[in-house]
Structure formats: C-alpha cells, structure tokens
Amino acid sequence: MPASTFNFHPLEESTGVGWFQELQKKAWEQFSQLPSPGRHDEAWRFSSIGNIALEGFHQAPPPTDEQSILERSQGITPLAAQLVFGNNRLIHADTSNLPQGVILVSLQEAIKKHEDLFRRYFMKEEARLGSLKLAMLHLSQLKEGVFLYVAPGVVVDKPIEIWHWVQGNRSALFPHTLLVAGAGSHLAVIEHFSSLEEEPLLACSLSDVVAEEKASIHHVTIQDWSPQAVAFHLNTTSVLQEGSATSLQLHRGGHFVRSENDSRLFGKGAKSMMLSIVSAHGAQEFDQRTLQDHLSPEAKSDLLYHNALSDQARTIFSGLIKVQKRAHRTDAYQKVSNLMLSDDAEANSMPGLEILADDVRCTHGATSGELNKEELFYMMARGIDESRAVKLLVRGFFQTVLERLEEPQLKNYLQLLLDHE
Amino acid sequence: MNFEKKSEINIDRSLGDFSYDVDYTFDAGVGLSESTIDYICDVKNDPDWVRSFRKEGYRKFLEKPMPTHWATKDLENIVFENIRYYLSQGSIPKRTWEEVPEDVKKTFERLGIPEQERKYLAGVEAQFDSEAAYSNIKAAVGKQGVIFVGSAEGLREHPEIFRKWFGKVIPSGDNKFSALNSAVFSGGSFIYVPPGVKVAHPLQAYFRINAQNFGQFERTLIIADEGAEVVYMEGCTAPKFETATLHSAVVELVALKGAKIQYITVQNWSSNVFNLVTKRGVAYEDAQIKWIDCNIGSRLTMKYPGVVMKGRRARGEVVSIALAGEGQHQDTGAKMIHAADETSSNIISKSISLGSGRATYRGMVHVPKHLKKCKNNTECDALLINTQSRTDTYPAITVRGQGHSVQHEASVSQINEEQIFYMQQRGLSEAAAMSLAVNGFVNDLVEQFPMEYSIELKRLIDLEMEGSVG
C-alpha cells in the first residue's frame, strides 16, 4: 500500500473550505492507520494484490499535452454536455445546452458554490467491499472531480459525457464522480477513463450515484487505462423509493484492475441493474466485487457480468446478494459467465447469497466454459476463418449484456465501440 | 406467507434424547494438555509413531487460529479447557451384543441398532463416547477379505495398509479441528475392501455421545481397492445437555482404480453439539466417491465433504440435505478438487431454514491448469420457512484453461402459499401441509438414501406443528 508514496496535501488553504480540509485530514489519518489488504482477508480472496507494486507513484502534474487530450475526447454524439479532465484538472467544459435545473460543475466549484447541496451527498456511503483504505487514500488525495445534480422532474434527454485522462510516467490519479438524479428526473451519463500514452499509472477512482424517488439514471463507464495501469474503481449506487439505476462497465485496459460496486436499495420498489463486460487478455487481472444490498421491500436487483479471458488473464468475481430483514418480496438475480479462450486463463467466481427475509426470489449462477464448438464449426463451414469466427462469437457473448441496457443512445454507442475492437 | 404468529415448528428429537449413568473405567479428565495425550496413548497402548503423530497434531492445533475470519463467531463459544477428551470402559470392542455391558447395550437397543443389524446390515460398529462398544462383521463378508474394525485395531493389526493412507488424504494440519482430532482421536472405523469385492449390504457405524461436556473425536479410514465397492453409513445422536458438547471427526476415503465408495451420514446430534467434521476422499482412475450427507441436528455443524479426483475419469459427488431449526446453524457444503483429465463432479444441496435457523452452503470447485475436459455441476436450493430464518450461499469456483464446463446455480425460495392453501382445501391441517411441502422439496434427494434411512429421514423431517392457527 503506497503509504510512503503519498504525502498529505489537502486542497489549498485558498479555497477557504475548512470542513473539506478537515475531512481530508481525517481520511489521511484513517488511511495511515488501516491495515493493507492481505492474503487472509476474505474481501481479497484470490486477488494478486500482494504481488502488485504500489510504490513510486506521484500526484499527476498538470498535463503537458492538453491539445491531444481534447482532440481525443471524441465519444458519443449528440451530447447534452461534456467535461474533460486531464491529470485531475478540468481542462474543458461544455455545459451550455443543459436544461434548467441541472448543476454540472467541477468538485472545486461545487465546494465553493453549492456547499449545502454538495455536502448532503458527498461520500455518504462507506466503502464496504474491502477497499476502505483505498477510499480514504482517494479522499485524502482528492483534487478535482465531477458534481452533477439534476433537480426533481428534470429530464436530460441526451447523454452527459465525462472524460478522465492521465498522462505522464507513474502518475497517480484520483477521479471523483458524484451523480445525483433528483426525484422523478431522468439522466444518462457516460464516463471514460483513458491513458494518453502507454505508461505505468495508479488510478483510484470513486463514484457515488444516487437515484432519488422515481428517478432514473443510466451510468456507463468505459475503462481504457494503459496496459501498465494499476486501478481501483470504487462505486456505490443508492436507489430510493421506486427509483431506478443502471450501470454498465466496460473494462478493456489496465494491468491490475479492482472494481467494487456496492448497490444499496434503500426504497420500496427500487431497482438496480448492474452490468459488466470484461475483455481480459495478456497478463491482465480483473478483480470485481459486488454487493446487491436489499434494505427495503419489493426492490429488484439484477446483475449480469460477462468475462472473456484469453492468454494468461485472470478474473475474480465475488458478488453478494444481501436481503435484510423485512426486505420482503425482494427479487434479486446475479449471474457471472466466464468464457475461457485460452489454456492459461483463470476465472474465479464467488457468487454469494445472504438471505434474512423469507418472502423472496433470489437466484444466482456462475458458469465457466468454452466457445460453443458447433457454432464455431458452423461459421467456419460458411467460409469464415477461425480467428474471425472466434471474434464474432465473443462479440455475441458481450451483446447478451448490452441487450439489457435500455438506454438506446448508450447502447448504440457501446455496440459501435465493440464492433470496432 | 407469515407463519410466525401461528405456529412453532419443532423437529422430533425425542428418540435420541436420553442418557444413562455409566461407570467409565478410563477418564482423561477435563481439559487438554500433553499429559492428556499421553494418557490416551497409554490407555490405547498406541505405538510410538501414533504418539508422535498425536503430539504433532496437538502442536498444530495450538498454532492454528480459529477460522472466524470466514466462519461464524459461535466457534469462540467452544471452551476447550472444559471438555473431557477421553472416556471409555475399555478400548477393545465386543463381538457380540451379549458381551456388551448392560448400561451401554440398553442405549443401542433403544436406538434400534441390533435390530437394524439383523435386518439389513453387513457389519456394525457402535461407538459409545470414546470407544467402540461393539464391532462385528457378518461372517460371509469377512470371508471375502473385507476388514471392518475400529481405527485402533486397524493401526495395530493392519499397519501395512493403515499407515500407507492414514493422514494422507487429510493432513493433520488441514485445519484447526483436524489437528485437534489428530491429537486425541479415538474410535471410528477402519475398512479395507480387497480388489474386485463388492460388499452387497451397507456397513454401518453408530456414534453415541452419552457423557456431558464430552468431546468425541473418531477417525475413519476407508480403502476400496481396485474395482471394489462399499457403502458405509453412519448415524449419530446425543442427549440434550445444558452444556456444549464437541464432535470433531476426521474421515478419509481412498477409492483406488475403478472402485466405488458411498458414504452416508444422517447427523442428528442434539442441539448442544458443535459438530466440526473434516471429510475428504481421493478417487483414482475411473473411481467414484459419493457423499450423501444429511444434517438435521447439532447447534453448529461445519462440514464440507470433499473429493480429490486424482485419476482420469474419476467422479466425485456430494448430495447434501440440511435442516436448520430454531437456534441451529448448518454450515455445510462440498469441495471438489479436479486433479486429472476428464474428471467430473456433481454437487446437489438442499437446505431448509426454519424458526431462527440458519443454513449456509459453502462450496469450493477447483480446476487447475493444463487439465482437459473437466466438468462440474452445482445446484443449491434453499427453502425459508419463517421471517427470522436465514440462508447463505458462498461458493468459490476456480477454473483454469478452456475445454471445461463448470456451472453453479443457486436459488432461494419459500414454501408455495398456493400449495399450502390447496392442501388445506383438501382437508389437511396447516402443519401437515407444511410438512408435506418440506418433504416434497427434499424428496428427490431423500430417495438417494437406502430405503431404511430414507424412511427414518422422512420421519425426522416430518415437522410437528404446535399451537393453532389464530
């Protein structure tokens, strides 16, 4: 754990926000005190964290090539708004077309101009899936991020796009995203995590998504870090009564990527859909931990994670459906599928259930298997060469997850992205 | 459905809930130390290698922490220094029931063991606290060269087979409780079935705890030589005392090429027993090991029968039924280690949680590198009866390489309200309807037990509903 790597530098005194500095100071103390994850830590079972060097990184300096960053920030169109960050600094913001009632600002601005609103939502949910120490590192090192608040009833009809770029050898990045969909509002957000060059980096991102009563939010993240990246992505989702949150994560880059997704169904009739596509190759390791926490009756959660593994890639999936007492008439589903494309790949699955209420419907499944030989044969018999046929079948395997995404613009964009792999 | 206000569900444990005053000739006293182990060695007249094996086990037991980082904190309520580790009337079992001392015999008669033996068993061993009081094998089976004796006799009379496998499937340091067993083990069976011999009827062991604050630590080793087949059944009961009792067995199975072993357990310990058992088998080429495991009793059971499939086309199977009643925690499951090509394993687990009961499934499936065509299928179904009931599922599945097929499925549900309503419409009481529904849930698994056991099981699972519908 990079305790020696980082020093404590809270946001400058000039921001004049004592409460935030106080939070950062406390986070630093907690980070320094908390034990590093070890081999006997259940929350890190099967993980190679012990072999991952976390030393020798530094807070990313200002990016040297803002022009390239802006040129390469070409994603989804049309857009409602776009923010581009380079090395933890906001370098571009286009928010002019946003409807009234939407606040989309940098974290620095949120602290200064929307203090009450921001404080109501900022880091309210503790990291519970093993990375509290990393969440505290994140908070103590935090410089910049996104605060998006959609007022009750407002519908944002086009996606909002956010880019987090990193540049520079051994840079450390701490992207922060706070998305709040007010009651009855509607929102779609796409986030990119990208490296400008192939360099070692450390990323420790934290995102909190809140869907209030009857709000609907779609949140897609595309992780494209450099092949040498060590990344921790800590995400929480909170859904209130009859709200709905859908997240889809597409993981492509990185050397060691830990992703934690903690979904809390606070309100009656809340819905959470958790989707993930991992294309793992080389010596990549993807370590995913999830929680579907049912705290209220009649809520629904649905998780579908598809991993395709080639070369010596490793994946770890540990998921838990937790149905608390009184969360009756819960409907929860969890499924992880591993498509093994190589003899050296390794998939670890730990799908879990903890059910404390009796009137529930909970199912989970985990499969690890190979490509359907008959389908492969059929395609090759039609003149498609083997490597192309394998590609198509893997594409189909990912499409199953995409089909669950109901937001058409995000879905189309992801389809195009995967078609061009 | 809400049964909470209406009824209380009890499991009938009256059959095993009695105890008799027995005069023990040998008593290692309370607590565990090196001298306890020496006492056991002296009483049992252990050879030197067993004495050092026990001491090594004791050292590992002290070294190992309680596995509470993943297991229940209830383990911390075991007070090792309050337990009596060895109690017996002598270490040589009797060959006929007539020779068994009256005070011990009446226990087994009340449990119906001699009667079952006459009716359908090939051999019986009856353990009372630390030692077998009775051990006998039908003459015809003995003539086939089948050895069925207590573990002490096994290590004395058949060291050439015993030592080769003893502690090899489950090393004493496997976990804290296998280490404890290695230190103080006493009783249990040693079975050897020669090549090609198929034992027509089941061999049975019955484990009885009679004394308070007692720890039972039997050790069973079963070896089926090439092409041999054997079915082993064990039952267990204890009276319900106020204080906790510990049962910590180690069971090792070895199925050589083409052999088949079926190991059947009906665990009905009283609800003050900590039942912490390590069970594992090794299956060589074309061999099959099947664990049929039914857990109804105990306060806390932690048991994950395993099969290491070491030879090509070996097969491992676990069929598990758990019933967690009021105050009980059944933490059961299976371990399947694939260590050769074309090996296959199957796990079917069904659990029922009622009252404040908690049923946990914990599983491990491991397919290491460079194997071809391994298969595993796991199905876990849990039934929840009351609002305060709890169920958990914690599988861990590792697959390396392509060409395997591994799938796990689990579901949690409750008793179908319509079914109950329908049965009540046909004149059944709510209690009877519930009972039928629960029996229906496990019926396909119960049928895998031998006839006599499945009848017993159905009776045990028959829930008694008390109180009336408000």
Image (tube, rainbow, N blue to C red):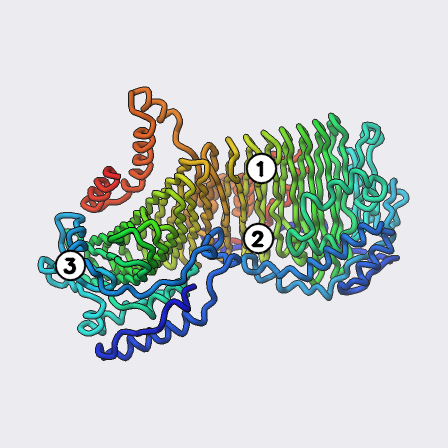
Q: Is residue A343 above or below residue B18?
A: above
Chain of the residue where label 3 is placed in the rendered structure: A
Q: Residues within 10 Å of mark 2 (few under 14, many from 20)?
A: many
Task: Determine the CA span between mark 3 and mark 2.
Answer: 53 Å
Image position, residue B348 (x, y; %): 54, 39
Disc nearer the start of the sequence (2/1): 2
Question: SS class of the residue under badge 1?
Answer: loop
- Residue A16 vs residue B313: left or right? left
Image position, residue A65 (x, y; %): 19, 58
Which residue in the protein does label 2 denote?
B9
Chain of the residue where label 2 is placed in the rendered structure: B
Chain of the residue where label 1 is placed in the rendered structure: B
Q: Residues within 10 Å of mark 3 (few under 14, many from 20)?
A: some
**Callouts 2 and 1 in the same chain:** yes
Residue at left offset 16%, top offset 64%: A103
Which residue in the protein does label 3 denote?
A154
Residue at left offset 65%, top offset 51%: B174
Mark 2 vs mark 1, foreground winner is 1
Task: Determine the CA span between mark 3 and mark 1.
Answer: 59 Å
Q: Quadrant of residue A401?
A: top left
The reply to whether dot 2 and dot 1 touch (C-beta < 8 Å) is: no
Which residue in the protein does label 1 denote?
B339
Dot 2 amino acid type: Ile
Give the number of the disc on residue A255. Answer: none
Dot 3 amino acid type: Val
Task: Determine the CA span between mark 2 and mark 1.
Answer: 44 Å
User: In front: B284, or A262?
Assistant: B284
- Residue B118 vs residue B315: left or right? right
Q: Quadrant of residue A267?
A: bottom left
